[in-house]
Amino acid sequence: MKKQRPLAKDHKNTIEVKLNTMTSNITTKKNLDGLLVIALEQAVAAPYLSSRLADAGARVVKIEREEGDFARRYDSVVNGESAYFVWLNRGKQSLTLNIKDPEDKQLLERLIANADIFIQNLAPGAAGRAGFDSLVLRQKHPRLIRCDISGYGEEGSYVQRKAYDLLIQAETGLSAVTGRPEGPGRVGVSVCDIAAGMHGLTGVLQALYEREKTGIGQGIKVSLFDGMADWMTVPLLHQEYGGKAPDRVGMNHPSIAPYGAYSVGGDKECAHVVLSIQNEREWQSFCCSVLMMPGLLKDPRFLSNECRVAERASLDHMIELVFSGLNKQELEARMEAASIAFGWLNSVSDLSVHPQLRRVNVKGERGVIRQVASPIQVQDADGNIRQDSWGEVPSVGEHDEQIRQEFGEIPC
């Protein structure tokens, strides 16, 4: 006969238990140390959210099926592991559960009862059918912060539809404004998933702050569609108020000129510079000190940004003629002297050796993985930047025994 492990009644003691059982290589205290996050998650959106909580010091228990998160099998390019998985699951603990099994379901309930945050992005309605509806959890655990991530939200005719990143890029019109004039394109990273994860993270952090004041947790709901619809506000306003959405213009900006990529001559392999003119002061400097064509300032075709956009083809032709006679070093010197914003059209290979790229080492199942350092740098009162230190990428069910002993049933 078995009995359930009693839940800790004192919240401070509960936090101490969590701290004692963290399996992280973090040696300095982080902002979210002491928080317990339960993540019933898969793919990208929810793992993005929980990974950022883990980076900030929270203990994240990732709930997986016996076969593991399907993102583990997207590819095998990182020492045999998936690039997506090692990026979004560092510093977490992996617990395998079948939430349809009564005992496993009870274990998950006990984990949630001890948790500060519960995150889920299962298929539409799956969490509710399993007994983990957000409102039900609110009644049981008033301090708990719940975050539900869905494809299309929880109202409307699309509620039951499955949603993945490219589908949302297409549905929100993002693909229609992305690419070259010949046809629509996909943004090269999972921008809809990432946007949903970022919005979820913002909501969770707001809820943590609210709980500090009231002692009550909140329910946060975000969707891939809502997140990308927000990012599509400018094209939508152009459509609804101007009568026409921006055209696909490849590496140009649809509303600003000159703002785009231009080839540069004088090199064995043609380089491409990306430049941006944001105001009339910069336009004057560009004409006088980069193009060496001050007469353009009086050309009626180019007197304002809207004029330059309308005459983009003529303007680009003039710019290309000048740039074709310069090599990369000459153009860079002119741009810097004129205080013009510019960058080089790099490949991913170029990014890997970029002088501004910061790295951190993370231990994976099959060795150390060099990952991009956190975009958030934390500075202390003395001006010192805290060095990133993240936990390992877990194998499937790596922490089963530990977590079952900690939160599971124990013999009489």
Image (tube, rainbow, N blue to C red):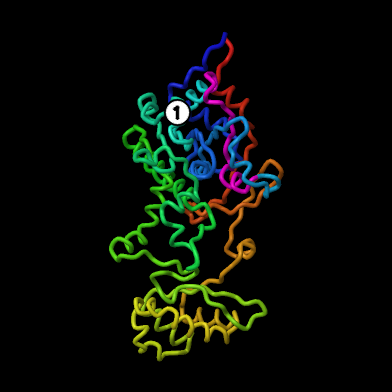
Front residue of this view, candidates 169 and 300: 169
Kindly identify the residue that appears in the image at 40 percent across and 88 percent down. Answer: 296
Front residue of this view, candidates 151 and 231: 151
Please identify the quarter of the rendering in which residue 85 is found.
Answer: top right
Give the residue furthest to the front: 182
Q: Is the residue 4 above or below the residue 226 in the image? A: above
User: Residue 74 at what x, y percent from top left?
Assistant: 62, 45
Q: Is residue 30 magenta?
A: no
Q: Which residue is mark 1?
A: 12
Kindly identify the residue that appears in the image at 51 percent across and 37 percent down. Answer: 41
Q: Is residue 88 magenta?
A: yes
Kindly identify the residue that appears in the image at 36 percent across and 29 percent down. Answer: 135
Quadrant where the N terminus sits is top right
Give the residue furthest to the left: 241
Quadrant where the C terminus sits is top right
Please identify the quarter of the rendering in which residue 397 is found.
Answer: top right
Would you say 292 lies left or right of 264 here? Answer: left
Residue 29 in sight: no
Residue 189 in sight: yes
Q: Is the residue 280 above or below the residue 43 in the image? A: below
Give the residue furthest to the bottom: 295
Q: Is the residue 165 above or below the residue 67 in the image? A: below
Front residue of this view, candidates 96 and 263: 263
User: Residue 43 at what x, y percent from top left?
Assistant: 54, 42
As shown in the figure, which amino acid type bears the numbered disc 1? Lys
Assess disc 1: are there few (<14), some (14-19) or many (≥20) residues with their C-alpha within 10 Å of its C-alpha: few
Q: Which residues are magenta?
A: 82-104
User: Residue 259 at what x, y percent from top left?
Assistant: 45, 73
